[in-house]
Image: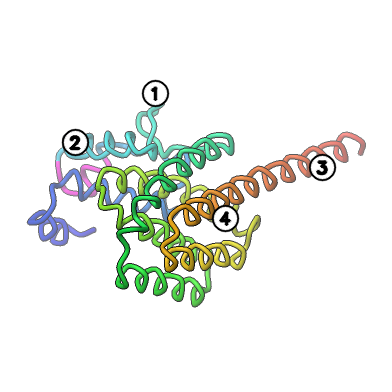
């Protein structure tokens, strides 16, 4: 981000939020990998500012779970294991299913058309990053008619955090077609105004993702153990 761009954006947003959003985008895109050290002096120089807004931006990213602090290293891009991911998905089920039950009765044709548009873009996507982004947008759009800003913020935070770590894993575990089939079932239940069915389908959908993550991790560990046995026998 150039100094000129930063100054232009500051008319609508505070500098800590600008820095936070830029770093968040880079973390979610993988440009800043897990374990990358986020030095306050280097970031202050990059954004042409003092350390104070940088420190506040990092504090906000820490609250989102994207940054952690380590002794003698300071702020680093956080990592997450499969068990932590599964815990977050359990939280997603609780939040998203509750939001869906509230949202479905409030949906109008514009909401349904928006959901369909996202799924059309999902179909047209050609990369894991593209269809993962469409998946994220679909889940957020599904919950938006609940008209609860705080609930939406919580859902967005957990969607963002889980999506960041599951892009590559889910491309191997579920592929593109399985989740999309679930999305169309959920959309059809929305059209029928069946909030209970939408919540049930959504729970099944997220649980399937969770189970695929667990299976992928299990198979990966089994293969690693087999390779270790082969090396030991050689």
Mark 3 or 4: the one toward you: 4
Q: Nearer the viewer, mark 3 or mark 2?
A: 3
Residues 150 and 126: in front is 150
Q: Pinpoint residue 115: horizontal percent, then vertical percent.
A: 39, 68
Badge 3 vs badge 4, beta-carbon distance below 8 Å = no
- Quarter where residue 223 is shown: top right
Give the mark toward the camera: 1 or 3. 3
Task: Report whether 59 appears left or right of 193.
Answer: left
Give the CA distance from mark 3 to mark 4.
22 Å
Q: CA distance from mark 4 to mark 2?
A: 34 Å
Q: Is residue 165 above or below residue 181?
A: above
The earlier-in-sequence mark between 1 and 3 is 1
Who comes first in sequence, dot 4 or dot 1?
A: 1
Residue beneath label 3, please?
227
Asked whether residue 173 is drawn in magenta, I would say: no
Residue under label 1:
72
Q: Are marks 3 and 2 in contact (CB under 8 Å)?
A: no
Look at the numbered disc 1 and give the secondary structure of its residue.
loop
How dense is the environment of label 1, judged by Cα within 10 Å: few (below 14), some, or many (20 and up)?
few
Percent x, y of residue 233: 92, 36
Left or right: residue 16 compared with residue 219: left
Q: Kindly state the secondary structure of the residue where label 2 is placed.
A: helix
Taking the spot 42% from the left edge, 49% from the top edge, the residue there is 159
Q: Position of residue 135 (x, y in %)?
A: 46, 61
Residue at which label 2 appears:
51
* Part of the protein shown in magenta: 42-49
The residue carrying mark 4 is 168
Question: What is the spatial separation of the Cα atoms under label 1 and label 3, in whole angstroms?
Answer: 35 Å
N-terminal of the two: label 3 or label 4? 4
């Amino acid at each position: 981000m150039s100094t000129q761009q930063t100054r232009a954006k500051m008319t609508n947003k505070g500098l800590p939020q600008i820095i936070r959003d830029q770093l968040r985008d880079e973390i979610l895109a993988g440009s800043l990998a897990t374990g990358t050290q986020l030095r306050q002096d280097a970031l202050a120089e990059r954004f042409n500012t003092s350390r104070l807004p940088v420190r506040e931006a990092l504090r906000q990213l820490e609250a989102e779970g994207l940054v952690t602090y380590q002794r003698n290293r300071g702020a680093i891009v956080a990592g997450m294991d499969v068990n932590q991911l599964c815990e977050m998905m359990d939280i997603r089920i609780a939040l998203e299913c509750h939001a869906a039950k509230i949202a479905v009765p409030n949906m109008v044709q514009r909401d349904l058309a928006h959901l369909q548009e996202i799924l059309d873009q999902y179909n047209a996507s050609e990369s894991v990053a593209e269809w993962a982004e469409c998946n994220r947008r679909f889940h957020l759009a599904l919950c938006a008619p609940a008209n609860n800003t705080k609930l939406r913020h919580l859902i967005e935070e957990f969607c963002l955090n889980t999506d960041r770590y599951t892009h590559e894993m889910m491309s191997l575990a579920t592929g593109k077609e399985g989740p999309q089939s679930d999305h169309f079932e959920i959309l059809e239940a929305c059209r029928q105004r069946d909030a209970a069915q939408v919540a049930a389908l959504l729970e099944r959908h997220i649980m399937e993702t969770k189970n695929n993550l667990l299976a992928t991790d299990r198979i990966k560990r089994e293969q690693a153990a087999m390779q270790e046995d082969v090396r030991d026998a050689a």
